Amino acid sequence: MLKRIKKDRVLYLMMLPALLYFVIFHVWPIIEMRLAFYDYRIVGDNIFVGWKHFKTLFSTPAFYKIIKNTLVISFMKIVLFFPFPVAFALALNELRSGPFRKVVQVTSYLPHFLSWVVIAGVWYEFLSPSSGLVMDLVELFGGERKNLLTDKNSILWVLFASSTWRSMGWDSIIYLSAILGINASLYEAARIDGAGRWATIRYIILPALAGPMITVLILNVGFVMSAGYDQILNFSNDAVLSRVDILDTYVYRIGLLQGQYSFATAANLFKGVIGTIMILLTHFTSKKLTGKGAW
């Protein structure tokens, strides 16, 4: 192994920043999760308290409301969003104009590289009740102007729409790559057999996408308790906090803002355990039903 590392030392040096990132921000925090079983002390040794913080967590009424919000938003982002990248990849594959196809791809990929701060600013202007394009169209068709960002019944769909706008193009890359990797002889055989476009999509393209779709779904299920901290933090306000307050924002509030580090660690450890269990359950269920899993 050391000989291989020495031989490919340039490649390993290129990987070093990413490895350091994962070690510092992902591996080391897992080791420090033991803080969930201690009372944190700035001065002196931490005091072991066992399951105290978990008992407090599960006895807090607000915690179950936060779990519900997290699951609802995650369901929208995982299950409802799931068909959009697949459909977009199929649509891109049908475009025959090379230059137009490239413009569509670049335009759809661009939002992925924008931070949620920028995206939130764009959507705040877009949905502005006084000058936003959406309310102008609503008024044009006889509707009444209202602020969707402060409406409890609309905010979840605003989150879903902005997340779809940001991620649909980028997430379609894996499916488009799978489509482009299909053997051309299969298309030739389909044409000889008289298959139209819909039959080709149904019997050739969709089966080729089954593997990537299952893998992406399993990986996304692992983030079921992570409903999008950055997005929620930028779109939340006092009027809709009861509908969009999720586990990550709860941990941020009680941990960093209120200084309850051990309690926040317990909440985050609970989130990590549930995510791991969901990944394993989804993998083995998929393996049992379809014969395909994440690995």
Image: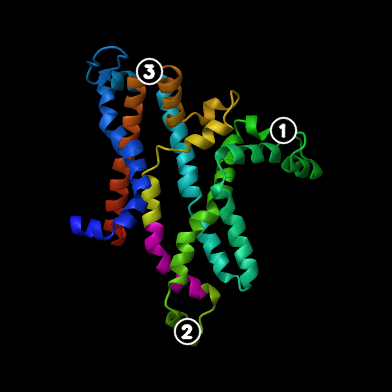
Q: Residue 188 carries which label?
A: 2
- Circle 1 is placed at which residue position? 146
Instruction: Check if mark 2's residue and mark 3's residue have beta carbons within 8 Å.
Output: no
Q: Looking at the picture, which amino acid does disc 1 mark?
A: Lys
Single out the mark in the foreground, 3 or 1: 3
Residue 287, quarter of picture: bottom left
12 shown above or below 93 = above
- Circle 3 is placed at which residue position? 260
Q: Looking at the picture, which amino acid does disc 3 mark?
A: Gln
* Residue 139, x across and y down, in percent: 79, 40
Single out the mark in the foreground, 2 or 1: 2
Tell me which numbered mark, 3 or 1, is placed earlier along the sequence: 1
Secondary structure beneath dot 3 equals loop
Q: How far apart are marks 2 and 3 (CA)?
A: 64 Å
Q: Residue 253 carries which label?
A: none
* Residue in the picture at 50% in, 48% down: 80
* Residue in the picture at 43% in, 16% down: 258
267 shown above or below 119 = above
* Residue 30, x across and y down, in percent: 28, 34
| Residues shaded magenta | 199-214
Tell me which numbered mark, 2 or 3, is placed earlier along the sequence: 2
